[in-house]
Amino acid sequence: MNVPEWNQRIQRWMADQAAGMERMYAELHELAEIGWQEQLTTAYIGERLSEVGLEVRTFAEHTGAIGTWSGPGGGRSVALRADMDALWQPVNGQWRANHSCGHDAHMTMVFFAVRCLKEIGYQVPAGELLAVFQPAEETAEGAKALLQTGLLDAADCMLGIHLRPQRELANGVASAGIYHGGVAKMHGRIHGRQAHAARPEDGINALETLAAIVTAVRAIRADLESGASCKVTTARVPNESDNVIPDEAEFAIDIRASSFEKLERLAERVRQTAAEIGEADGAEVVTDWVIKAAPAIPNIDMERIVGEAIVEVLGEKGLALPVITPGAEDFHFYAMERRSLQATMIGLGCGLAPGLHHPEMTFDHEAMRTGAAILAMSAIKLLEEGRQR
């Protein structure tokens, strides 16, 4: 069967799934659990994957599930990835786990894409199709944890999908890539010297050094290109006596840039600035930084294939340019950690408002059928291309 015929089958099948998708979305929305605590969500997903005939693997060490649909050996391994965790935030005045980033919709779309292929009679050729349900995306730890299981070592291609706000993508269109920025967290400690507040010249005031670092980092941010930023997000001075010059202070800086190279350069600039301020004050400033979320690594070949799938589903006008966003996504750790893995994330326009992470975020639920259809078509294209090689 050729690609247009598969597309017609997918479209007809999806047209009948509105109620089922809405039900699964509602159930996952109510199950909302924060990162590393997605036990109920993992059990739910595992049961559903088993129902459609996938071999399901879960983990003793942490939450998450991977469903495997195997064809004959030796072919391409394609993974569809969904994030599982919710945010912990106040909703109507009460703190609770809440799916305000669309992860409940992402899980629904990945599951229905796989179920669709099963029920329309598609047969995975040489290789396998993986349904990857990843925990702890919001803490940027889940992708690395799943990589460490070894179950993705054979994966050749990976697709993710994410709902996008209205200001990024209009409802009814989709992009074949999302170019998230990278995020680094810098932690710093300032060591000064205590003194009586009446004799500040006898001490080295760690608080004043911290204040100078805050001002300097703000000045650096004002000088940066669009999409890059740095800002002090935590400041602590453990001083209980207001007549003592404080000798210790701690701070954290959030650093963002569009590529790893820019992220590294910006982190070094911030580190050097903090060290110079400390030296000028006579204080010791010690810093360390770590990448919390990898920047996107654009993959033109994957974008081409997914772009063709989007056109099949939505027509030429439904294909948008890749989304460039200052937000972060730990999906990109897969390609960063395994350079042989071809990966891209689909951006789905869905009328999302007022914005991601807003406790009252809403979107057009019909877009889930579109997203699932794009994932299903993309999987077919990737698997069939692998068979031809």
Image (cartoon, rainbow, N blue to C red):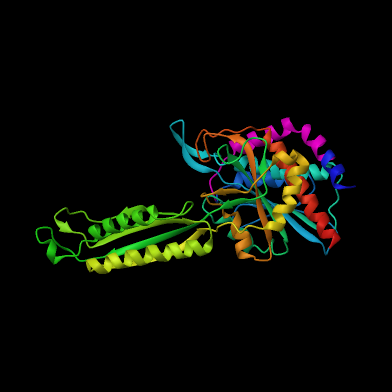
Left or right of 153: which side holds 214? left
On the question of residue 80 being in view, the answer is yes
Quadrant of the snapshot with the C terminus? bottom right
Q: Residue furthest right?
A: 1
Residue 31: horizontal and vertical position, in percent?
A: 59, 39
Q: Is residue 141 above or below residue 368?
A: below
On the question of residue 50 being in view, the answer is no
Left or right of 229: which side holds 251? left
Q: Which residues are magenta?
A: 9-35
Left or right of 136: which side holds 318? right
Q: Is residue 113 above or below residue 78?
A: above
Q: Using the rendered view, name the quadrant where residue 314 is placed.
A: top right
Residue 45: horizontal and vertical position, in percent?
A: 68, 45
Q: Using the rendered view, name the quadrant where residue 275 is placed.
A: bottom left
Q: Is residue 362 above or below residue 305?
A: above
Residue 71 drawn in magenta: no
Residue 365: horizontal and vertical position, in percent?
A: 65, 33
